Image (cartoon, rainbow, N blue to C red):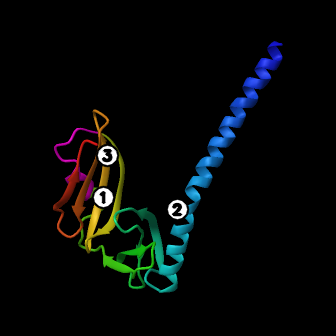
Amino acid sequence: MKQWIIFIAGFLSFLAIVLTILILILGNKPFSNVEKTAIAQVKDENLLTEVSRSYVYSSDQKSVTVIGTDSEGKLKAVFVPISGQELSETDLDGKITAQEARGIALQDMEVKEVLHTKLGREENKTIWEVVFLTENDKLNYVYISAEDGSIWKRILNL
């Protein structure tokens, strides 16, 4: 009887692990497909020759941010809207970096963990979105202008 209990417990544990992995893979698949499509579009239109990063940026208008270098070796970001609007791009040379944006956003804050820093477009401005948890586990969003490093918007203590 003891062997059956051990077998059933082991089988249920294995099944739970397999289902968790399957859910994570299938849940991430739409984002992966959108990113691959955006990267292919950016390369097909010769906007970037090398891609270093890409991710989905969510705001009023969801888009994929593709960061890389163009044919002249300049660092650029291309914003590919998910729902059929025009591409937009910006030179990142001379702009605020992700590390600088994080430093500005986290200044005078009690930070437990930085969740992510993403570049995106908001109201025709290039913005860094810094998302973090404070020591009391409150979620915070700080938006930093990539042009001059000014704080564009703060959403604190969610």
List x then y, in percent, for residue 68.
42, 73
Q: Which residue is mark 2?
A: 31
Mark toward the start of the polypeptide (2 vs 3): 2
Mark toward the start of the polypeptide (1 vs 2): 2
Q: Left or right? Give the position of 54 relative to 26.
A: left
- The residue carrying pointer 1 sits among few (fewer than 14), some (14 to 19) or many (20 or more) residues within 10 Å by Cα, namely many
Q: Which mark is residue 49?
A: none
Marks 1,3: beta carbons within 8 A: no
Q: Which residue is mark 3?
A: 132
Q: CA distance from mark 1 to mark 3?
A: 10 Å
> Which amino acid type corresponds to the residue marked 2 in the rendered image?
Phe
> Which amino acid type corresponds to the residue marked 1 in the rendered image?
Glu
Q: Which residue is mark 1?
A: 129
List x then y, in percent, for residue 129.
30, 58
Magenta residues? 101-111
List x then y, in percent, for residue 15.
71, 36
Q: Residue at x 31, y 77 (%)?
A: 90
Q: Is residue 44 above or below residue 119?
A: below
Callout 2 secondary element: helix
Q: Residue at x 45, y 63 (%)?
A: 55
